[in-house]
Image (cartoon, coloured by chain):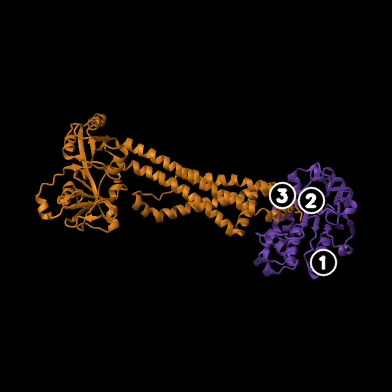
Amino acid sequence: MVSAIAQSVHLSDVTYKWRPDLPPVLDISTFSVAPGERLFISGPSGSGKTTFLNLIGGVALPDTGEVTVLDSQLKGLSPAKRDAFRADHIGVIFQLFNLVPYLSLIENVLLPCRFSKRRHARAASEGGTPESEARRLLTYMGISESALDNRRVTDLSVGQQQRVAAARALIGAPELLIVDEPTTALDENSRQSFLEILFETVARNRQTLIFVSHDERMEALFDRHIVLSDINRAAQPEDIAG
Amino acid sequence: MFTFHLALKSLISRRVTVFLTVLAIAMSVMLLLGVERIRTETRYSFASTVSGTDLIVGARSGSIPLLLYSVFRIGNATNNISWRSYRELATDPNVAWTIPLSLGDSHRGFRVLGTNGDYFKYFRYARSRALRFTAGKPFEDVFDTVIGAEVADALRYEVGDRIVVDHGVGQIGFSSHTDKPFRISGILARTGTPVDRTVHVSLGGIEAIHIDWRSGAPARGLRIDAERVRQMNLQPKAITAFLVGLKSRFATFTVQRRVNGYGAEPLLAILPGVALQELWSLMGTADRALVAISVFVVATGLIGMVTMLLSGMNERRREMAILRSVGARPGHIFSLFIAEATLVAGIGAILGTVLLYAGLFVAQPAIEDAYGLFLEVGPPTRIEIIYLGAVVVAGAIAGLIPALRALRLSLADGMIVRS
């Protein structure tokens, strides 16, 4: 499905400053991820993780250099196109509080389909309707049928919340998954099963996975490991702003 | 449309705070519409209180006090008109009819008006409508009385009932004319004017109950019973005011000049239309002030809404980042907040209207009771709809404050909130 693309994500000579008069927080000469690759990125606070992910997601633009995602140069796209591009091609899982508190489980999972026709169509072709695909994914993630319809997202355990978030990132099979510290709040067992399911799905859909964590114990599970502060020449690990 | 759906869900999830905010706006809207409605109805009620009367004549005071006591039965006359002067003016060749009015007594809070049969013949209200009887007929005997619809309703009187007139106009008179009860001979149909709240008796009746009184109290040792009174001369020595109908409206100023320059006693003739307008312009400032106050109250409600939306902003940065991560544009975040503000203002406006109607249903009798003002429960008027629209638009505009802040935060945070 993604084999025609040379590189999933490519950064070249990228710098980023919060304000023009401040030194850059990010300065990366080159970085790339191959399609279908499972990449583990670690880095202490202050290594520019947040900025790095916002750049790949297209919600921030570099001051210099190029960010290319799935062969699209993000700089060349209008802000609205970048937002649409993200909706179409990227699934994101955060560390904590991943869900919109006032939406139901199903509605949370369906959010990307609201903003992307492409993912709406793909979800529909997988599961008949996006709703049934959302149910399938949630059940697959180990959310019980009864919890699915009756629980409010705020009543879910952290582990369950992360599974719902994963279902949302996966619905409509986006080519790129960005996962930011998803297991920090999970206990050992939950983490294990969460990762298993995630890897299984990613492998089946041949999705590219960028997994950010400071927990280097998980490194072994991935194809490749990059320490962000090693490639970011502007990294200031002692700086608490991360 | 999806943003609207999100906004609605988001508001529902915070229903307690949102409900209180909506309630504040609703009450302010109710106040605004209520003031507007009372203003309109007051104006209409004013305009329709007297019609067909060309001049009102009373003792010289001001045009507004004269209008107030002669037409609205509010307050008291400073002085009377002697019977002789009245007759002399009433027989002016330009005058078609007159209605004498004699005020000063009350019955259980309702004013008693002494007049004559011409009252039922010539008095007109609300675009030339004549008085109508729902039961009985005009007074014939000295101790007959005709009561207004509201008097009959409030006190559950029927034709044939006997009532006692109180001296003075307090809620309960200090002293009563208990020795000379009146028999209800007729009940008038509702008019929506002060007539409804009036107990009408003949001028002779007024004279009769005071015949054995001196200086506002029963004269000691003087008791004249009802039967003997009937035999006496009951021609009044004075009346409070009289309404004049002219043969031709062109004579209005001639007659007015004659009254105002009348030598025997200082009198005042006013044109009811002009006096009404004058009174209205006085009230007008008061009700414009009320409208201004209501507008400020609405603004306060909207500020409350902005406060609510702003205070939740920090907790919602995650939510905004999630929406951005799934492909929402900054514009979606912006419109989410505008939609929330518009919804809160809109629901407030609707609830306010509902409260207004509920309030009207409940308060209508009380308002009519206390002020003789009949508030019609009709569909919203054009100006009211404009007000409602303005509240919603103002809500949307007020929503700019949280929306712009959310937009700025969202642009800074992107899809990942720095923690």
> Residue B219 in the image: x percent, y percent?
16, 52
At label 1, the amino acid type is: Glu
At label 2, the amino acid type is: Asn
For mark 3, give the secondary structure: helix
Both marks 2 and 3 on one chain: no
**In this rendering, position of residue A150 left or right of residue B204:** right
Both marks 1 and 2 on one chain: yes
* Disc 1: which residue: A196
| Number of the label disc, if any, that sits on residue A54 | 2
Q: What whole-number distance in Å separates the C-alpha atoms at marks 2 and 3?
A: 12 Å
Q: Residue B372 or B171: which is nearer the viewer?
A: B171
Tag 1, which chain?
Answer: A
At label 3, the amino acid type is: Ser
User: What residue is at 70 percent from the left and 62 percent from the top?
Assistant: A132
Answer yes or no: do the residues labelled 2 and 3 have beta carbons within 8 Å?
Answer: no
> Residue B6 in the image: x percent, y percent?
64, 54
For marks 1 and 2, the one nearer the N-term is 2
Q: What whole-number distance in Å separates the C-alpha atoms at marks 3 and 1?
A: 33 Å
Q: Which chain is orange in the picture? A: B
User: What residue is at 78 percent from the left and 53 percent from the top?
Assistant: A90
Q: Residue B6 or A1: which is nearer the viewer?
A: B6
> Residue B374 in the image: x percent, y percent?
36, 49
Tag 2, which chain?
Answer: A
For mark 1, give the secondary structure: helix
Q: Which chain is purple in the picture? A: A
Answer yes or no: do the residues labelled 3 and 1 have beta carbons within 8 Å?
Answer: no
* Disc 3: which residue: B410
